[in-house]
Image (cartoon, helix red, strand yellow):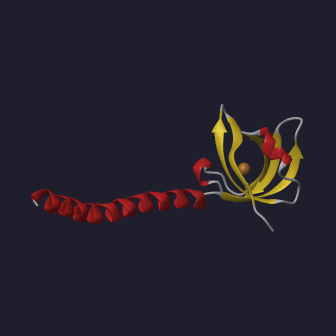
């Protein structure tokens, strides 16, 4: 009899704990969404597969303290150069890798 009551109590406390845990997970997930919101808008001007470089007209890059401009970036993954063409809109993150401005995240914006 006591063990049935104990199991019931355990079940009840889990029912309270689990939603709280789920809320915590959800909160950290929306943190990821904030990160995605930091992506900068850009337009592909030139794709240079031979050099592994991409020319982008980009909006301000806060992490690099760079205003909007058109410039050449190296890309972290050369396969990305097969996924874009001049005129495509992209959203991206750039960083200085070994002193070279490098696209570290790239998303093609579907028209
Ligand atoms: Cu720039």
- Which residue in the rendered view is the most extreme toward the front? 1
Quadrant position of residue 38: bottom right
Identity of the residue drawn at 89% across and 55% down: 86
Vertically, is 48 above or below 69? above
**Image coords of residue 107 (percent x, y):** 72, 55
Identity of the residue drawn at 35% across and 59% down: 21
Identity of the residue drawn at 34% across and 65% down: 19
Q: Quadrant of the C terminus?
A: bottom right
**Image coords of residue 9 (percent x, y):** 18, 62
* Foreground residue among 20 and 83: 20
Q: Quadrant of the N terminus?
A: bottom left
Vertically, is 66 above or below 74? below
Quadrant position of residue 88: bottom right
* Foreground residue among 53 and 110: 110
Identity of the residue drawn at 82% across and 37% down: 52
**Image coords of residue 8 (percent x, y):** 20, 63
């Amino acid at each position: 009899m006591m063990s049935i009551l104990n199991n019931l109590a355990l079940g009840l406390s889990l029912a309270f704990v689990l939603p709280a845990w789920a809320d915590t997970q959800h909160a950290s997930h929306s943190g990821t969404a904030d990160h995605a919101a930091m992506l900068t808008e850009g337009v592909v001007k030139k794709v240079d597969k031979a050099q592994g470089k991409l020319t982008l007209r980009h909006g301000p890059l806060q992490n690099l303290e760079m205003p909007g401009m058109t410039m050449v970036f190296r890309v972290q993954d050369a396969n990305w150069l097969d996924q874009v063409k001049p005129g495509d809109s992209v959203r991206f993150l750039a960083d200085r890798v070994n002193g070279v401005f490098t696209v570290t995240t790239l998303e093609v914006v579907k028209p």
